[in-house]
Image (cartoon, grey):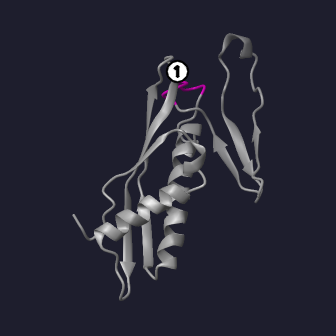
């Protein structure tokens, strides 16, 4: 159906590669031309061999899941005549170890906060149903084994 590309670049900058003392900073360049500085998480590779200011693969994975869910949700809401004004998600990925002791992102919890306007507002049950449909139709969710949970899908005016 479609193809998606990213170019990942890393270069050795010092003489201590074989000792393990080398920078893991690298870049991701996408087909539109955007280049993003990347690095392993400092919780995986300590500084100075990582850079906490850069995007790490685990953060990008969580962001991709959240972004795909949001885009699918927005599409479904628009198809149902719901006017979405804003969508904010503070998604969290949980790293655990599998049965073999290998670390993996086992759970991503989405925390969407959605603002609507107009004459037609969703009930909490309708909003929950839209999140369920968004999860079922999200390309990324259909490509992973990580569990995805939508937690507290409340509008910002609900506390």
The answer to whether one can see residue 155 in this image is no
The answer to whether residue 1 is above or below residue 96 is below
Q: Is residue 77 magenta?
A: no
Total marks drawn?
A: 1
User: Residue at 39% across / 64% down in the picture?
Assistant: 129
The answer to whether residue 121 is above or below residue 144 is below
The residue most toward the top is: 19
Left or right: residue 145 compared with residue 24: left
Point out residue 126 in the picture as x, y percentages from the top left corner: 35, 70
Nearer the observer, 78 or 126: 126
User: Residue at 57% across / 45% down in the picture?
Assistant: 60
User: Residue at 43% across / 77% down in the picture?
Assistant: 85
**Which element is circle 1 on?**
loop
**Secondary structure predominantly adopted by residues drawn in magenta:** loop
* Residue count near mark 1 (Cα–Cα under 10 Å), binned few <14, some 14–19, many ≥20: few
Where the N terminus falls, by quadrant? Answer: bottom right
Left or right: residue 33 compared with residue 118: right
Q: Kindly indicate the quadrant of the structure image that contains residue 15.
A: top right
Point out residue 102 in the picture as x, y percentages from the top left corner: 52, 21
Q: Is residue 45 magenta?
A: yes
User: Residue at 43% across / 50% down in the picture?
Assistant: 91
Where the C terminus falls, by quadrant? Answer: bottom left
The answer to whether residue 80 is above or below residue 36 is below
Q: Which residue is mark 1?
A: 102
The residue most toward the left is: 159
Q: Which residues are magenta?
A: 42-49
The answer to whether residue 108 is above or below residue 104 is below
The answer to whether one can see residue 36 in this image is yes
Point out residue 121 in the picture as x, y percentages from the top left corner: 34, 80
Nearer the observer, 53 or 126: 126
């Amino acid at each position: 159906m479609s193809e998606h590309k990213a170019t990942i670049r890393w270069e050795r900058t010092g003489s201590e590669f074989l000792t393990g003392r080398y920078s893991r900073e690298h870049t991701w360049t996408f087909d539109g031309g955007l280049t993003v500085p990347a690095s392993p998480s400092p919780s995986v590779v300590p500084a100075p061999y990582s850079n906490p200011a850069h995007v790490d693969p685990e953060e990008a994975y969580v962001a991709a899941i959240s972004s795909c869910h949001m885009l699918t949700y927005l599409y479904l809401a628009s198809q149902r005549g719901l006017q979405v004004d804003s969508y904010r998600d503070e998604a969290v990925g949980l790293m655990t170890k599998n049965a073999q002791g290998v670390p993996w992102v086992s759970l991503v919890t989405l925390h969407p906060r959605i603002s609507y306007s107009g004459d037609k507002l969703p009930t909490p049950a309708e909003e929950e149903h839209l999140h369920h449909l968004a999860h079922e139709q999200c390309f990324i969710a259909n490509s992973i084994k990580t569990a995805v949970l939508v937690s507290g899908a409340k509008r910002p005016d609900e506390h």
